[in-house]
């Protein structure tokens, strides 16, 4: 670890001085030895993320769509609008940064890009909210399970607090169940400022395990920042 920190300090020396600099390491809550090592060397827990699961054989709550909004099938001419809407909606999330064009290309070409499973809400010509579900067939075969993921859950600011995320999420769970999945999973920042954890608990998700992000200032005395 000492070698890695020295190497990273050398890299950081080339970065603008005004940028906050820190080491960051993620560990599963069950990795006790790693946690002890990090804490012994000056790292402190900075953020907690839950992996959550929902039994799709259980009844689904009612979650009607807000008035004047509708869900439409995602087509190729929508992908850029969906990408841009998510970028806007996630601006207030921890660790957000503007995404690069090559990331868009990577997004459209990975195996979890499954638009037929998406629930995308529109108001006229604007994308206002999303849940981009996917099924990882390789993972399901490896672990002998029927799981789908409900991820990229977001609503743009002007359309929040109207029950849209809840409605899109319930519709997504129902779609996965229709396709034969027995459980849905997602990841959440427990300190999400928009109450994401509370929403997921309210529709039946429960914590499966916790992932902890540890940080340490690159230079002693330096204040850490998002």
Image (spheres, helix red, strand yellow):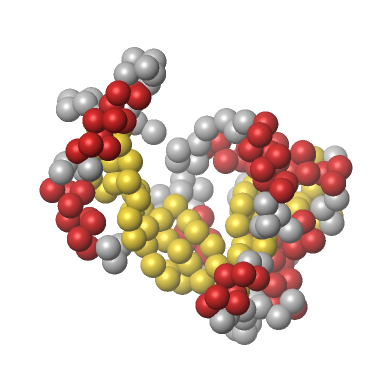
Any part of residue 202 in sight? no
* Residue closest to the far left: 40
Residue 180 figure quarter = bottom right
Q: Nearer the viewer, residue 65 or 146?
A: 146
Q: From the viewer's perspective, is 146 left or right of 96? A: right
Residue lying at 52% horizontally and 32% vertically, measured from the top left: 97
Q: From the viewer's perspective, is 182 left or right of 121? A: left
Residue 170 % position (x, y): 66, 68
Any part of residue 135 in sight? yes
Q: Nearer the viewer, residue 174 or 8?
A: 8
**Relative to 40, residue 30 above or below:** below
Residue 56 % position (x, y): 61, 79
Residue lying at 42% horizontally and 71% vertically, measured from the top left: 208
Q: Nearer the viewer, residue 95 or 137?
A: 137
* Residue closest to the far bottom: 57
State the quadrant of the C terminus: top left
Residue 164 figure quarter = bottom right
**Relative to 56, residue 74 above or below:** above
Residue 135 % position (x, y): 66, 67
Residue lying at 23% horizontally and 56% vertically, measured from the top left: 34
State the quadrant of the N terminus: top left
Residue lying at 31% horizontally and 30% vertically, measured from the top left: 8
Residue 169 % position (x, y): 65, 63
**Relative to 145, residue 8 above or below:** above
Disc tally is 0
């Amino acid at each position: 670890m000492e070698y890695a920190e020295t190497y990273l300090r050398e890299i950081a020396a080339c970065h603008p001085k005004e940028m906050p600099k820190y080491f960051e390491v993620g560990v599963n809550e069950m990795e006790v030895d790693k946690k002890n090592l990090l804490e012994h060397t000056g790292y402190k827990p900075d953020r907690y993320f839950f992996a959550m699961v929902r039994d799709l054989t259980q009844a689904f709550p009612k979650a009607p769509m807000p008035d004047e909004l509708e869900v439409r099938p995602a087509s190729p001419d929508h992908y850029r609008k969906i990408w841009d809407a998510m970028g806007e909606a996630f601006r207030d999330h921890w660790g957000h940064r503007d995404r690069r064009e090559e990331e868009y290309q990577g997004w459209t070409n990975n195996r979890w890009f499954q638009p037929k499973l998406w629930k995308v809400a529109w108001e006229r010509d604007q994308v206002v909210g999303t849940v981009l579900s996917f099924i990882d067939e390789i993972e399901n075969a490896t672990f002998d399970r029927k799981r789908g993921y409900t991820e990229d859950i977001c609503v743009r600011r002007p359309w929040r607090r109207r029950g849209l995320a809840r409605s899109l999420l319930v519709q997504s769970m129902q779609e996965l169940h229709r396709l034969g999945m027995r459980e849905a999973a997602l990841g959440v920042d427990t300190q999400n400022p928009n109450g994401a954890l509370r929403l997921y608990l309210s529709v039946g998700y429960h914590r499966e395990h916790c992932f902890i992000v540890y940080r340490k200032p690159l230079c002693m005395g330096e204040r850490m920042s998002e």
